Amino acid sequence: MGTIDGLPPLRDVIRTHELVAKKQLGQNFLLDLNLTAKIARLAGDLSACDVLEVGPGPGGLTRGLLAEGARRVVVVEKDPRCLPALEEIARTYPGRLQVLQGDALELDLAAHLTGPVRIVSNLPYNVGTELLIRWLSPAVWPPFWSSLTLMFQREVAERIVAKPKGDHYGRLALLAQWRADAKIVMHLPPEAFTPAPKVHSAVVHLTRLEAPRYPADAAVLSRVTAMAFNQRRKMLRSSLKGLGGDVESLLEGVGILPTARAEEIGLEHFCALARAVAERSA
Ligand code: SAM
């Protein structure tokens, strides 16, 4: 049976280039090109977009993105063993695939992209959360990307979309939902990957908001939520003592019960609290 693009099946690509998966690089590959094309479709219309993919590996998702009509795809891969396979894809789609070799945490990726930009990646587990936090915390908002379609371990995906009072609710949910609409759009069992990881995975789609959902200073909001969730089982009047001054009045002033715990407080109230903290020290 032919593939979606006439290139060899991914199993053959892996065998030809001897791409034995390296655990330390988070290498769990997707080999089903129908599945990677489906993930590409979940990202929305790509025909007028540059797509950034971090960690293309042997190129399964890259091929899905190109076959689904992405205007241009820029990939950044840390493992040099993958480059020949990626160059083969680039030759099949002339002018549409740029391959960068290096660490996504160290390169200035935005410099290689022309907007609008969508980021679509099956992220390496070891750097996935850090990349997401960076993409959600640029110095200036709106950021260089308009949407993120990212594969994570299911537990991380649940932390991104979590609501107050749930076990997964915390700083990541607040950061993501402050500046984006976030939803889980696909669940994948371990067997979808080669080699199969120990955990389930999920794809999260985040669409940026043009302005944060509620006003607040990013640094103050981050400080307040860090303090609150570092001691998530404690009452806020105690966990937020480090803010100094009369914490109880501060909380009451924005409609938060001083005896409430961080996990009970929604985004709107955390933003109000961050504004009150900023006003107090202005
Ligand atoms: N996209 C491919 C797929 O879906 O089959 C591979 C995904 S695999 C989970 C993660 C990929 O990220 C691996 O190819 C790995 O070598 C690469 N990688 C790991 N750390 C990286 C980093 N810091 N920067 C860029 N790529 C990295």
Image: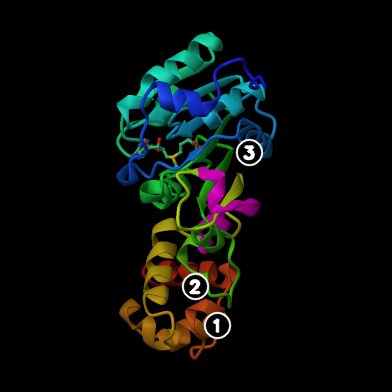
What's the amino acid at mark 2? Answer: Leu
The residue pinned by badge 1 equals: 256
Task: Give residue 50's position: percent from left, percent from top.
Answer: 56, 25
Could you say which is closer to the camera, residue 110 or residue 65? Answer: 65
The residue at label 2 has a CB less than 8 Å from ligand 1: no
Q: Which residues are magenta?
A: 173-193
Could you say which is closer to the camera, residue 187 or residue 136? Answer: 187
176 drawn magenta? yes
Q: Are marks 3 and 1 in contact (CB under 8 Å)?
A: no
The residue pinned by badge 3 equals: 39
Q: Nearer the viewer, mark 3 or mark 1?
A: 3
24 relative position to 58: left or right: left
What residue is shown at x 52% (from left), y 23% (from top)? 73
The residue pinned by badge 2 equals: 273
* Quadrant of the image where one finds ligand 1: top left
Task: Give residue 275's position: percent from left, percent from top.
Answer: 48, 67
Q: Earlier in the sequence, mark 3 or mark 2?
A: 3
Mark 2 is surrounded, within 10 Å at the Cα level, by few (under 14), some (14 to 19) or many (20 or more) other residues, namely: many
Residue 238: which disc? none
